[in-house]
Image: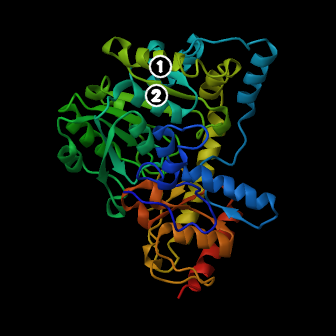
Amino acid sequence: MGGECTADPLGLFHGCWTGGILPDMETEMTHAMNLSKRALGVPASPTLAITARVKELKAAGEDIIGFGAGEPDFGTPEVICDAAVESLRSGQTRYAPTPGTPEAREAIADKLRTENGIECTASDIIINNGAKFTVYLALQAIVNPGDVVLLPTPAWVSYKPMIELAGGVVREIPAGPDSDFKMTADQLEAAIDDDVRAIILNSPSNPCGTMYSPEEVRALAKVLEANPRVAVIADEIYERLVYSDEPYLSMASVPAMAEQTITINGLSKTFAMTGWRIGYACAPGKNGEVIKAMTRLQSQMTSSITSFLMSSIPAALQKATAEVSSMRDTFAKRAELIHGLVTQWPGVSCPRPTGAFYIFPDISCCFGKTSGGGVRIQSAMDFASALLDEAGVAVVPGEGFLGCGVNHVRLSFACSEDDIHAGCQRVREWLDRLT
């Protein structure tokens, strides 16, 4: 998909463009300092843009209910904070090993072995500056210019730019609400050819809030096992936030997929540590080639994560179980609440969220209608902009999520039940005024 985000009366996404260099910016390259085509061709993240816009409006005294933020509304558990503070006070402020300290890497490996069934050792682990950078680093390590990377869509907004920054070519595998936004094994098999180098698999999904069942993971694994040249980048950042009756199954725990999968995870979502920027990758086998490559790249980019945060990793993984369980139970209740309220919106439909903290309703029934403020709704962008302007409710428009996402908006229920009730009521009243 391509095209300029012109329907943006509130300026939510300054410079949002998915088709390459912004036309007006191409001429600006002749003035002042020349910028690279790479920098000009990368769109700003719409999810971060909406979060920033909400903060601006609230700071200006506006009554805004925000469903945009992709981060928990809880505080980081105290036991984790204490570990970091103690490290800081004890002088752990010097350089740390690029892939992480032995203790932190072993804590992650132990977690993956015992909780996820992934056979690995500390040497199979690299710790990075957030799971987002970890995905970027993995792509840089395995993708060559012209390689095709499969991307089931709708997909998180940053995957496509990161693939393209690695020189890769995105090949979408579209999945709609009828399948809970999940591709089938048949779709995957049909999409693979000799040009395919990797696939990004995100479950539970951002933005869709649904996850692949163990049976579905095994079916995908069977296809991928028959295509060993295709690496799997399994983004499992939401794997502990699951509300389905079915257990979570990691792709790398399927024995045949252990050495074909790069597992990406981190502490941001599960432990309410988004600002700490701690992510990690696990890639067992093959003489540790992938982890060694990622380590070399990281050594020339960021070096290690902040050294005095290393101790927070064992603390989180080993001592914050009760806090994680409590947060997960709260999110599960919110998932049921918001799904019940959203499905009462006239003409709007969406699958029940079974993981992460997002719901992704189809609002295309509103296209062609006019809001109470006189805005003609022709896209999810129009919907989100008018909703924020006229009802004070912030959602993320689906254009950046590709595929059928253009007909959807994403709501995060990482907010209070009171805000969920009030925000959903505002949306319903606003919808009732469409003509």
395 or 269: nearer the viewer: 395
In the figure, residue 384 lies in which quadrant?
bottom right
Image quarter (top left, top right, bottom left or bottom right) of the N terminus = bottom left
Would you place residue 88 above or below residue 213 in this image? above
Picture disc at residue 47: none
Would you place residue 202 above or below residue 414 in this image? above
At which x and y percent is residue 200? 37, 39
Q: Is residue 348 left or right of residue 431?
A: left
Q: CA distance from mark 1 to mark 2?
A: 7 Å
At which x and y percent is residue 127? 54, 22
170 or 277: nearer the viewer: 170
At which x and y percent is residue 178? 33, 64
Would you say the residues marked 1 and 2 are in contact, meaning their CB atoms lie under 8 Å apart? yes
Which residue bears the numbered disc 1?
297
Q: For the residue marked with disc 2, what is the amino acid? A: Leu
Provide the secondary structure element on which disc 1 rests: helix
Which residue bears the numbered disc 2?
137
In the figure, residue 176 lies in which quadrant?
bottom left
At which x and y percent is residue 111? 51, 25
Colour scheme employed for the rendering of this structure? rainbow
203 or 7: nearer the viewer: 7
Q: For the residue marked with disc 1, what is the amino acid? A: Leu
Q: Is residue 73 left or right of residue 198?
A: right
Tell me which label, 1 or 2, sits earlier in the chain: 2
- Residue that protrudes farthest toward the bottom in the picture: 435
